[in-house]
Image (cartoon, grey):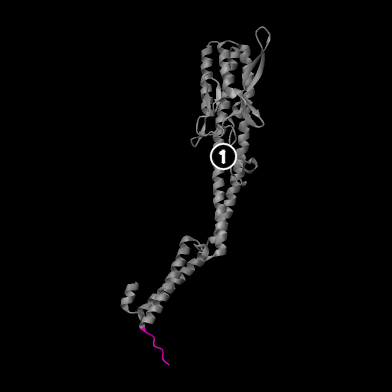
């Protein structure tokens, strides 16, 4: 029994083989160009599921790294501002010491009061320092200027006189009410951050806020000194360096050297808080540097895992592509011998 093979069946079979050959060649070329073994999970369900999990971890890693870098830069700005404030305080104490020792009698007291006023202006600007247009020493208040001065020249934090602030159960209060925006701020550094009743669990996040109240001082203290007659006096003074400098300026105007001497010592005690804050920020920055190094190492490992899961062996895939291309060329060559010229012209 003879079987008749028609030209139509030859053409149909040839076109099918040509299509398959071209598809294989294009697929191999896509793998070489993209460097990926598959583009859809359905192509390799097991590897695709693993790849999605890896990508999720990489995205989380990138987010946390961004948080750490921003926090580190923000803390550095705060640290620089506090260091500058501490230097200003040191210069003030040097100038006041000249007044107390009378080493520069040719300079009038108005010169010293001007120096103190300019120093206060500088402290105010530094306390209101910004990072990315956000105030960084105002607690949770990042939009409006946290540090101001009232009509009486008293230093204020978010509208509250700093000398009226006290710490009660780790919370800042003034006149029986909570100080606005005085709570801490935290970021996620990969500790599975947890929020309970709207409050971040500090064990699951990292504190990035810098308390201007702790650094610059709050509340009041009694300062004792002897007047010119030898009588002991008690003077209630603010623990905030801005207000202390204000009182020092007034003491210079009043020629009250005994009070000025007591304020000089008190300012030195208050400035110790700035030094403590700078040291604390330094330790926190070191921790963030270590965390960033860990996250970068983790990212390298994830990239390698992604390559092992989704990637290709370049040499193998290039060889496959060359083989498929060679097969496609042979198919085209074969077609020129068995397929009508009009159809071959259309295919080309």
Residue at the far top in the pictured view: 229
Q: Position of residue 191 (x, y in %)?
A: 62, 46
> Residue drawn at (66%, 17%), measured in percent from left and top?
223
User: Can see residue 330?
Assistant: no
Q: Position of residue 208 (x, y in %)?
A: 58, 38
Q: Position of residue 184 (x, y in %)?
A: 60, 35
Q: Position of residue 99 (x, y in %)?
A: 58, 14
Question: Element at badge 1?
Answer: helix
Decide if residue 286 is on the left or right side of residue 334: right
Residue at the far left in the pictured view: 342
User: Can see residue 4?
Assistant: yes
Per the rendered image, the range of residues in magenta is 1-6
Q: Is residue 80 magenta?
A: no
Decide if residue 230 is on the left or right side of residue 29: right
Q: Residue 169 occupies which quadrant of the picture? A: top right
Q: Quadrant of the N terminus?
A: bottom left
Other-residue count near label 1 (Cα within 10 Å), few / some / many at <14 / 14–19 / ≥20: many
Decide if residue 28 is on the left or right side of residue 303: left
Q: Is residue 210 above or below residue 307?
A: above
> Residue drawn at (57%, 46%), measured in percent from left and top?
64
Q: Is residue 62 above or below residue 149?
A: below
> Residue drawn at (51%, 15%), measured in percent from left and top?
111
Q: Which residue, given by chain and number where applicable, does mark 1 sit on?
A: 72
Q: Quadrant of the C terminus?
A: bottom left
């Amino acid at each position: 029994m003879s079987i008749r093979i028609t030209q139509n069946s030859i053409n149909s079979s040839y076109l099918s083989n040509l299509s398959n050959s071209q598809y294989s060649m294009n697929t191999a070329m896509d793998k070489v160009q993209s460097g990926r073994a598959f583009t859809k999970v359905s192509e390799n369900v097991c590897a695709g599921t693993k790849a999605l999990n890896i990508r999720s971890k990489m995205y989380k890693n990138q987010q946390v790294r961004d948080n750490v870098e921003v926090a580190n830069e923000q803390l550095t700005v705060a640290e620089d501002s506090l260091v500058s404030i501490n230097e200003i305080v040191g210069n003030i104490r040097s100038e006041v010491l000249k007044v107390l020792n009378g080493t520069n009698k040719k300079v009038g007291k108005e010169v010293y009061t001007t120096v103190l006023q300019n120093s206060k202006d500088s402290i105010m600007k530094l306390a209101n320092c910004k990072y990315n247009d956000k105030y960084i020493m105002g607690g949770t208040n990042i939009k409006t200027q946290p540090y101001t001065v009232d009509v009486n020249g008293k230093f204020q934090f978010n509208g509250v006189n700093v000398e009226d602030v006290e710490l009660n159960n780790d919370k800042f209060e003034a006149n029986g009410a909570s100080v606005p925006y005085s709570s801490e701020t935290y970021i996620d550094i990969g500790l599975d951050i947890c929020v309970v009743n709207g409050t971040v669990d500090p064990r699951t996040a990292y504190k990035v806020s810098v308390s201007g109240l702790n650094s610059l001082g709050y509340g009041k203290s009694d300062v004792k000194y002897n007047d010119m007659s030898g009588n002991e006096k008690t003077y209630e003074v603010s623990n905030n360096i801005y207000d202390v400098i204000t009182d020092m300026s007034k003491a210079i105007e009043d020629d009250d050297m005994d009070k000025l001497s007591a304020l000089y010592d008190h300012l030195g005690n208050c400035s110790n808080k700035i030094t403590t804050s700078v040291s604390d920020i330094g330790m926190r920055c070191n921790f963030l540097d270590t965390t960033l190094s860990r996250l970068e190492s983790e990212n390298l490992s994830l990239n390698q895992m992604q390559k092992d899961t989704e990637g290709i062996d370049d040499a193998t895939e290039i060889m496959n592509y060359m083989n498929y291309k060679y097969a496609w060329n042979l198919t085209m060559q074969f077609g020129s011998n068995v397929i009508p010229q009009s159809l071959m012209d259309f295919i080309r």
